[in-house]
Image: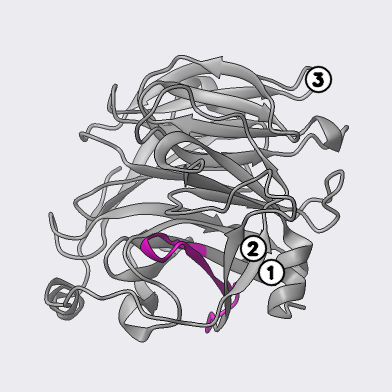
Amino acid sequence: MKRYIPLAALLLSACATEPAQQIYAIDTAPIPASIETAPMTGTGDKADDPAVWVNVANPADSLVLGTNKDEGLHVYNLAGEELQFLDVGRVNNVDLRGDVAVASNDETNSISWFAIDPVTATVSHVGDTPTQKDEPYGICAGQVGTTYYAMPTYKDGMAQVWSVQTDKMSEGPELVAEIQVGQFGQLQLEGCVFDEANGQVFLGEEEHGIWKLDLNDWSAAPVSVDTIAAQNGLVADVEGMDIWAGADGAGYLVASSQAADRFVVYDLKAPHAPRGVFTVTANADGSIDAVTHTDGLDVSSAALPGFPKGILVVQDDGNPASGVDQNFKLVDWSLIESALGLD
């Protein structure tokens, strides 16, 4: 079954006429990077989006998956060393739930699927699902019970919902909804994240702000969470986003405010109050450079070696020069928690 769900006309008009916003000053907390991955080979805009896989049996063997949007998928350990490279084409964003990862592949116009072996901690490409739509851009994964979701997003403001039962993965997913967020062809989506505990999905509209969808009712209209115009820290482009998940649905939403080289934190539960803004700076001895112009990011609240409260992983546009040797930086969540006074 496929449904096409337009947003209310009033919201379409408001988004379409919103003027471009300038970068504005706001108080930010400096947070040093802890670890960086090996750089991408070659120059240019290559690194894009990370995803953290937690090895439940042995957290020290957890992985960071990172897309190279010109070539394929890199796999790193928590020390930032590259362990694998999967030559699967131009994958832009990646996300995972459990031992299954998905990536938006705009070379094949498909969702690329990956299996992570929990014993060997190795990643395998297991197939591709044509999206029936050109150039899938962002993607996020979710799981509710035995239903696994993959949501590719598009530059024309469309988000697709694909689902498959976890015991029938070999049969492939079904397209269950197409949701138009903003005016068709004008408003670009990329980053998104499922918040299963609270029944919602957050989406970043690059030149407007953050929306949320009702995970239990795909026909419900998207709801605005924050806008660039509100000046809580967002500027264009609103890019990667993920959540730090606490107990009983509590936690935080983190979003990349790309042009300002900063990150905005919100309460995960409604009304999603802004909790602060931070930047990722060079470490104390200068061996790891500061983060600029972040595209994708990922958060894990799992306790990992050296990171008892979890980690934030962000793409770094310049290492140190823009478009040269791009990579990913790992940040200790406990430093963010302390600097912003998070509970």
Tell me the distance, in whole angstroms, between the alpha carbons under discs 3 and 1. Answer: 30 Å
Task: Report whether 282 appears left or right of 60.
Answer: left
Disc 3 vs disc 1: which is toward the camera? Answer: 3
Q: Nearer the viewer, residue 190 or 119?
A: 190
The first of marks 1 and 2 along the sequence is: 2
Kind of residue at disc 3: Val
Residue 334: x and y, percent?
Answer: 78, 63
Residue 232: x and y, percent?
Answer: 45, 82
Task: Report whether 142 appears left or right of 249.
Answer: left
Kind of residue at disc 2: Ala
The quadrant holding residue 208 is: bottom left
Q: Secondary structure at mark 2?
A: helix
Residue of label 3:
119
Q: Nearer the viewer, residue 315 or 135?
A: 315
Q: Secondary structure at mark 1?
A: helix
- Image mark for residue 197: 2
Q: Is residue 138 magenta?
A: no
293, above or below 208, in the image: above
54, above or below 334, in the image: above
Q: Secondary structure at mark 3?
A: loop
Residue plotted at (21% across, 65% down)? 182
The local crowd at label 3, few if under 14, some if 14 to 19, many if 20 or more residues have their Cα within 10 Å, is: few
The first of marks 3 and 1 along the sequence is: 3
Residue of label 1:
249
324, above or below 290, in the image: above
The residue stretch that appears in magenta: 255-272
